[in-house]
Image (spheres, rainbow, N blue to C red):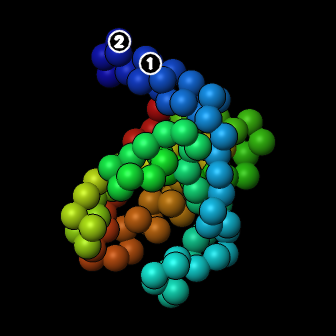
Amino acid sequence: MNTQDNAFWQALEKLVKENRAVIDRPRGSAHPRYPECIYPLDYGYLENTSSMDGGGVDVWCGSDEKKQVDAVICIVDLLKRDSEIKILIGCTEEEKETVYQFHNESEYMKGVLVRR
């Protein structure tokens, strides 16, 4: 790792701290276009931010009360023909693995998990 890595994580922490996470797809809910796709954790976006798809920066929110930002998942979506990062907030190691599996179970979406 280089010396700038810490600045990346600090910038993500600032983004999360200054913008409220809106959970529009709670744990156990179905994807609006793909009802067989069930969200294993709370999923949403950061208010007042923007991402590749025109919505807010996506977040996965786990059960760890510390609510640390210590991982992101970088995804490529072949159906939408785009890529994004999704911030993992307060995710345990098991929840990180769950998010990783979620983004890799389809032939159309692939992701890599980047830990702090």
Q: Quadrant of residue 8?
A: top left
Front position in the image: 81 or 94: 81
Mark 1 neighbour class, 10 Å CA radius: few under 14, some 14 to 19, many 20 or more: few
* Residue type at numbered disc 2: Thr
Which numbered tag is attached to residue 79?
none
x and y, in percent, of residue 96 in the image: 54, 53
Residue 18 vertical placement versus 30 (above, below): above
Q: Quadrant of residue 104?
A: bottom left
Which residue is depicted at the point 47% across and 46% down? 57
Residue 58 visible? The answer is yes
x and y, in percent, of residue 105 in the image: 38, 74
Front position in the image: 115 or 42: 42
Mark 2 neighbour class, 10 Å CA radius: few under 14, some 14 to 19, many 20 or more: few
Which residue is depicted at the point 27% across and 67% down? 80
Q: Secondary structure at mark 1?
A: helix
Mark-to-mark CA distance, 1 and 2: 7 Å
Q: Secondary structure at mark 2?
A: loop
* Residue type at numbered disc 1: Asn
Which residue is depicted at the point 43% across and 17% down? 7
- What residue is pinned by disc 2? 3
Q: Are marks 1 and 2 in contact (CB under 8 Å)?
A: yes
Residue at the bottom extreme of this rendering: 36
Which residue is depicted at the point 51% across and 60% down? 99
Which numbered tag is attached to residue 6?
1
Front position in the image: 39 or 94: 39
> Which image quarter is the N terminus in?
top left
Residue 72 vertical placement versus 80 (above, below): above
Give the side of residue 80 with respect to residue 34, left or right.
Answer: left
Residue at the right extreme of this rendering: 65
Residue 71 visible? The answer is no
x and y, in percent, of residue 49 in the image: 49, 39
